[in-house]
Amino acid sequence: MVKRKSWVWDYAKREGDRAFCDLCDSENNNEYSCVGGTTGSLIRHLQNCHGIKAPEESIRKRPDKITPNRTIAV
Ligand SMILES: [Zn+2]
């Protein structure tokens, strides 16, 4: 399975199991755990402290594409 890069890495760096917010000063407490690829705490931080919201495609993984052989009657 291919690892999909999360949008949070546009704003943070990852080192091993830790994530560091790029938007915060490194002197501040900008370390977040991302063990197992969990970026929930970092996402919450970006939203609350920097007003950055997750792109819609990251929130909902609903396939919007309509397959050719599955025509919906209009
Ligand atoms: Zn930050």
Image: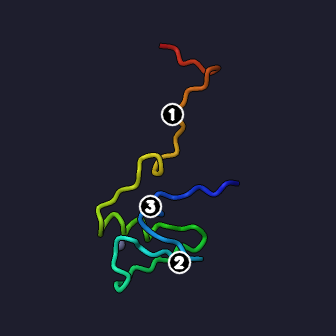
Q: Is tag 2's residue or tag 3's residue first in the polypeptide sequence?
A: 3
Q: Is tag 3's residue or tag 1's residue first in the polypeptide sequence?
A: 3
Counting from the top left corner in percent of width and height, residue 18 is at 53, 77
Name the quarter where the N terminus is drawn.
bottom right
> Neighbour class for label 3 at 10 Å: few (<14), some, many (≥20)?
few
Q: How is the image coloured?
A: rainbow
- Dot 2 falls on a residue whose secondary structure is strand
- Dot 3 falls on a residue whose secondary structure is helix
Q: Which residue is pictured at 29% across the width and 61% down the height? A: 51
Callout 3–callout 1 Cβ contact below 8 Å:
no
Amino acid at dot 1: Asp
Foreground: 72 or 57?
Answer: 57
Task: Say which residue label 1 marks.
Answer: 64
Task: Say which residue label 3 marks.
Answer: 10
The CA span between labels 2 and 3 is: 15 Å
Look at discs 3 and 1 and give the one toward the viewer.
3
Q: Quadrant of residue 23?
A: bottom left
Q: Is tag 2's residue or tag 1's residue first in the polypeptide sequence?
A: 2
Q: Is residue 12 left or right of residue 5?
A: left
Amino acid at dot 3: Asp
Q: Which residue is pictured at 36% across the width and 66% down the height? A: 46
Label of residue 18 in the image: 2
Ligand 1 within 8 A of label 2's CB?
Answer: no
Q: Is residue 37 left or right of residue 54?
A: right
Amino acid at dot 2: Arg
Give the residue at the far bottom of this rendering: 27
- Dot 1 falls on a residue whose secondary structure is loop
Q: Which residue is pictured at 45% across the width and 75% down the height? A: 20
Foreground: 15 or 66?
Answer: 15
